[in-house]
Image: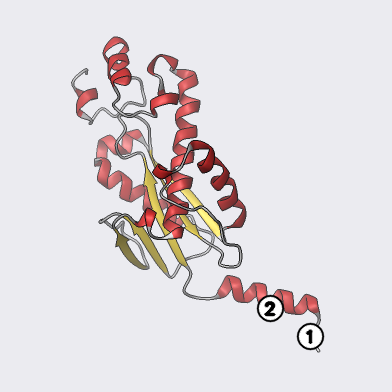
Amino acid sequence: MRSKKFLAAEQAALLWDVPGLTAGVDEAGRGPLMGPVVAAAVILNDLHPIKGLADSKKLTARQRDKLYDEIRAKALCCSIAMATVEEIDQLNILQATMLAMKRAVEGLRLKPYKALVDGNRLPTLNMLAEAIVKGDAKVPAISAASILAKVTRDRWCAEYDLLFPQYGFASHKGYGTAAHLLALREHGPCPQHRKSFAPVAALL
């Protein structure tokens, strides 16, 4: 008769080795005038469901922070990656977003059988992939990825705000608000502003 320890090890092996794992993929930061675009890929664990997953934009900052910790604790694996401002300016924002998504999927400790990507475009991946419009509101794994990406980028903006407090990055997160555009005109672009974006390019 097999021991409890052997059965537990066998179940763990089955969990980790089963083909058909699905990753949800999403990004944050396509629209802002500054900073990197951040992507995340998440493979959820059906044995440890997470309540409250939704499109990150529909959640409060407090809800996102709580879910961020829960996703990191309960998911089978997750990966967060970026494309830099330099890559955005060199490639354009769409291609830089695809690059960040590709990096996020390739950074997963477990290789998924299929990637479900929010939106209507797909990065180049060496696996099955499907683009799902508004997937962050329809597919829990994509919702989880949207939360990881959003929280990571928001925290990045808060940290960068300490270096350049005159722009207000911690509050507007780099989006082209009236306050941000006013600060841009008063102080000029900082090193993390996207030079290929029209409001920034006009000041160079």
- Which residue is at 41% across, 44% downward? 58
Residue holding disc 2? 10
- Residue 180 is labelled as none
Q: Tell which residue pokes out farthest to the bottom in this image.
A: 1
Estimate the x, y position of residue 191 in percent, counting from the top left.
Answer: 36, 23
**The residue tagged with tag 2: helix, strand or loop?**
helix
Inspect this view and state whether residue 40 appears: no
Q: Locate the C terminus by quadrant.
A: top left
Image color mode: secondary structure
Q: Is residue 198 above or below residue 145?
A: above
Q: Is residue 116 above or below residue 90?
A: below
Circle 2 packing at 10 Å, graded few (<14), some (14-19), many (20+), is few
Instruction: Determine whether label 2 and label 1 are within 8 Å by CB.
Output: yes
What's under tag 1, amino acid-wise? Arg
Circle 1 packing at 10 Å, graded few (<14), some (14-19), many (20+), is few
Residue 95 vs residue 26: left or right?
A: left
Residue holding disc 1? 2
- Which residue is at 79% across, 78% downward? 4
Image quarter of residue 128: bottom left
**The residue tagged with tag 1: helix, strand or loop?**
loop
Estimate the x, y position of residue 88 in percent, counting from the top left.
Answer: 29, 38
Q: Is residue 115 above or below residue 64?
A: below
- Which residue is at 36% across, 26% downward? 192
- Which residue is at 48% across, 54% downward? 107
* Of residues 122 and 172, the one drawn nearer to the viewer in this rendering: 172
